[in-house]
Amino acid sequence: MCGIIGINSNKPVSSTIINSLKKLEYRGYDSAGIATLYDGLIDEVKSEGRVNNLEKNSLVQSMKGTIGIGHVRWATHGLPNSINAHPHSSQYVSVVHNGIIENSTLLKKFLISKGHNFKSQTDTEVIVHLITENLKTENIVNSIKKTLKSLQGSFALGIVFKDQPDLIVGARRGSPLAVGYGPNENYLGSDSYALKSMTNKITYLNDGEFCIIKKDHVEFFDEDGVKVNKKVLELSSEEKSYDKGDYKHFMAKEIEEQPTTLKNGIKEYIDNSNNDINIYNFPWKTNEINAITLIGCGTAYHSCLMAKYWFEELTSLDVSIDIASEFRYRKNRFKKNSLYVFVSQSGETADTYAALDLCNQNNMKTCSIVNVIESSIARDSKFVLPIHCGTEIGVASTKAFLGQMLILYIFALKIGLLRKDIIKEKFTEKIKDLKTLPKLVEQTLLTDNKIQTISTTFNEAKGSMFLGRGFSYPIALEGALKLKELSYIHAEGYPAGEMKHGPLALIEEGMPVVILAPRDSYYKKTISNMQEVIARGAKVLLITNKSKDEVISENIWEKVEVESTNDDLLPFLLTIPLQKLAYYSALKKGYDIDKPRNLAKSVTVE
Ligand code: M6R
């Protein structure tokens, strides 16, 4: 989704802004732009498509400004073309914006009545003209304060002013924004990943705050324009150089990294010598909690659904799950003894953040399971369980999904033990099994060649279905989502037992159907459902686990076997061939695997 970079320096900034914008590319975008200040003038260059197009523009190469802002845009209001790309500028001010201004139509009417002319179809341009209007009567701080108060919706902003050669303004409400500190220069960024290549000293703005960034210092203000003191955080530099290595795509690398990332997660939480789980400083007693609500979006929601099965199996808690964009607008019955868990790779997903915020406002117990520990969701949750799977760049979430499931499983086991819902012997047995998971994932990754061949059939089909029961149902949903988002093939995930209630009508001769039927307690039922789709002409790809007992069915098109382990852990292994299926299918189609069309890695608008 949109990304912001701002640099105030003594040296020309255009090439550093371009390089930082490249770091933001993974978020998903459709146009890019840059504005620098030189000799009392704002130079602005914008282009449709990739940052490369912008970089090639000779005007960018000749920019001499030592202060500037850059942006990658994911279109919300107006087509993804160079006119609508950011920055948007008047004669006096230039603005980059992440988020959506909900009252832009009304504001635009008012500004047109005051004589302002609009060039683009964007909501952002109203901010430019509002600041310009307010500057007629106010100083910088007051004009910003006044402008921000007129805006409804969400924003992170970077602003430069024609007659202010040593000043960038940053402001946030709803969308994340950070300030970075360098030697004789300071930075603004919507994402610490982009800032990390320049500095590891960072301050995050809170909602409603704005800041003035000069070369040698930064001042912060609350929404009323009152100065506030903020902490400077030191980020770990370990991930500074995360790149594709020898892989063609980040996604391929991230799939193969899963044995290592699971090992890291296990190392962080499992006490090897005692076969116990370490969760330090959990702020509530487990007997104060009798219900749990798990909330997320997309893949993170699928890990919540998975966790529902585990929590119900291993604890006596009441378990509910919710899609964040639904939860945030419903009339929720907040319960004192409920724990609200927010699952997110990026920790910046707007809907998940809003759901968390709502729970915090209602004084609920909030906990997050995130990958980016500096993120807004992590910072604003009362307790955080990090995933520890490292930077994930591919828009399609892979290692973070397994990481989220790992932590949710560990959390369910620990709560089950503390509440005495499971006995110590069973707990110890499950921990021992869990420790073997990275090796099993490594072995399952070897199913590669077969999946490559199979993917051709999916590419040729009009659509496909992914079916599973019990623990395999969330994985069926995840498999279908991966195929949709990467290869743009219609794919539906369904509980296998639901087929007769409607979706069976979709099955026709030759339609590829993935059946997830590991040999768990649902196995026989799922195999019966498989026969029903085979009988109607489906080409079935059966994904099961290795066993000495053959599957009794004659008409299976293809079979892929994952390693065997206890029922709880099979979902991790079933996920692997589905990730690969989506990857190879998109690869054969020649699609942009790490940046699928229309999608963004960090979904910071609702
Ligand atoms: O960063 P988050 O985990 O909060 O993101 C949630 C979803 O946007 C994300 O999982 C999305 O569904 C992925 N592209 C799926 O691969």
Image (cartoon, grey):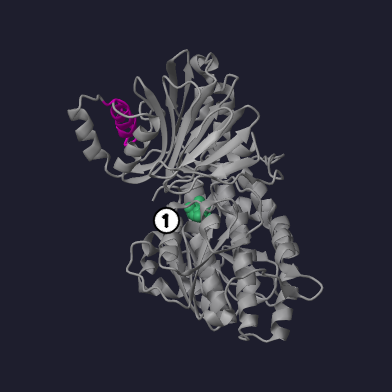
Residue 304 appears in the picture as rendered: yes
The residue that appears at 43% across and 43% down in the rendered structure is 226
Residue 226 left/right relative to 560: left
Query: Measured from the top left, where is residue 143 in percent x and y?
Result: 34, 33
Circle 1 sits on which residue?
351
Residue 214, placed above or below residue 470: above
Residue furthest to the right in view is 273
Residue 90 left/right relative to 420: left
Residue furthest to the front in view is 226
Residue 79 appears in the picture as rendered: no
User: Which contiguous range is marked in magenta?
Assistant: 118-136
Query: Measured from the top left, where is residue 181 in percent x and y?
Result: 61, 35
- Badge 1 element: helix
Q: Quadrant of residue 192?
A: top right
What amino acid does circle 1 point to? Asp
Nearest to the observer: residue 496 or residue 371: 371
The residue that appears at 38% across and 44% down in the rendered structure is 224
